[in-house]
Every structure is written in structure tokens, then in C-alpha cells.
Amino acid sequence: MVQLKTKLTLEEFLASPEANLNYELVDGEAIAKMAPKRFHSRLTGTLFTLLTQWCQNRGEIGIEWAVILKKNQQDWVPIPDLLYISYSRLPAEHFVDEACPIPPELVIEIISPDQSFGKISQKAIDYLNAGVSRVWVIDPKDKSITVFYPDTLPQSYRNDDTLTDALLDGLQFTAQQIFQLAGIP
């Protein structure tokens, strides 16, 4: 006998235990997010520190903070590795313990060993289509940072290429600096 899966609504997902166990809502299903490995963890810590110093009084940096978005007109709740949302989008006074209710300016995804750049690139496009302004895809193997924009082709940064962005005014670093600070050989 064939069993049909019922799709979860956003409300059902947010009320489920999976919403608190590092699951993402994708196409009505609760999908487990891959557990980070050492390089992933080091890059997350390095980027969190760098971005937290930069964003003082500008906004908030979230580590694995779920965000409520739409993908193909369906509710989508991904858990980016990091995100930045300005206080102009989500005021500091809106301080509740829930998934981020508004698309952030920046989402960062770090490629894990079992993930492909192509799959994460598609997720980056999904983020942009859902209203996220920038997506950084960090590749520890390639030691690169690829920035996805809503209105132009992605741009990759390696070695001493300097990453700057008018959206993130005053933030400036090289890909090499990030990987060195994270201690990635």
C-alpha cells in the first residue's frame, strides 16, 4: 500500500519538535540540516567575530538562525549558517525568540564536505528570489567566497581579492584573511 506524505504547513512546522532540532522546512517537509565539521565551525566562528565587530549598532548577526521565507510560493524555513539583518529591517525592539520573520540583508552558507557548490548555488538563488539582498557561499576546499547578487552575476573572491560591498558599508577583507584567521590550511 502506498502511503502519501502530508505536507507540513508553516504553523505545523514551527510548532513541531523538528523546528527546534536544526531542521529546515523545504517543500512542506522537515529536512535535517547537515552537522558542521571542523573547518565549517572555524569559518563560522571567524565570520561571526568579524561581522559582529563590523555591525555594532547597525544590526544583528545570527548563527544558524532560522528565517521564514517563500520559495516557489510555498513557505520555506532555511537555517543559514550565518545571517545579518539590519535594525532598519528588524528593529532591535523586536526581540523575541523565534525564527527571523523578515528576509535578511546577508545570508552566508558554508559548503560542507558532502555538499556541492551547485546545490548551494541553487539555494543562494532561492534566497535571492525570497528577498535576501546578498548571499555568500564559502568554499573551504577552494578557499573562495562567492557573492550572489539579485541583479548581476555572482563574483568569486580568492587569495588577496578584496571583498567590499556598498550594502555592507565599511566592511572590507580578503578571502585569504578569512581562511587564515580560521586556521584553514
Image (cartoon, grey):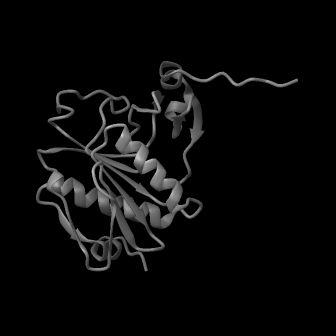
- Quarter of the image where the N terminus is located: top right
Residue 101 is situated, as x and y percent measured from the top left of the image, at: 32, 29
Residue 48 is situated, as x and y percent measured from the top left of the image, at: 30, 56
Q: Nearer the viewer, residue 32 or 5?
A: 5
Q: Does 112 appear above or below 175?
A: above
Residue 64 is situated, as x and y percent measured from the top left of the image, at: 41, 45
Residue depicted at 43% across the width and 43% down the height = 126
Residue depicted at 45% across the width and 62% down the height = 40
Q: Nearer the viewer, residue 98 or 103?
A: 103
Residue depicted at 55% across the width and 24% down the height = 16
- Kindly indicate the quadrant of the structure image that contains residue 175: bottom left
In the displayed structure, does residue 16 sit left or right of residue 110? right
Q: Does 9 appear above or below 144?
A: above
Residue 129 is situated, as x and y percent measured from the top left of the image, at: 37, 40
Q: Nearer the viewer, residue 166 or 39?
A: 166
In the displayed structure, does residue 84 sit left or right of residue 37? left
Q: Nearer the viewer, residue 26 or 37?
A: 26
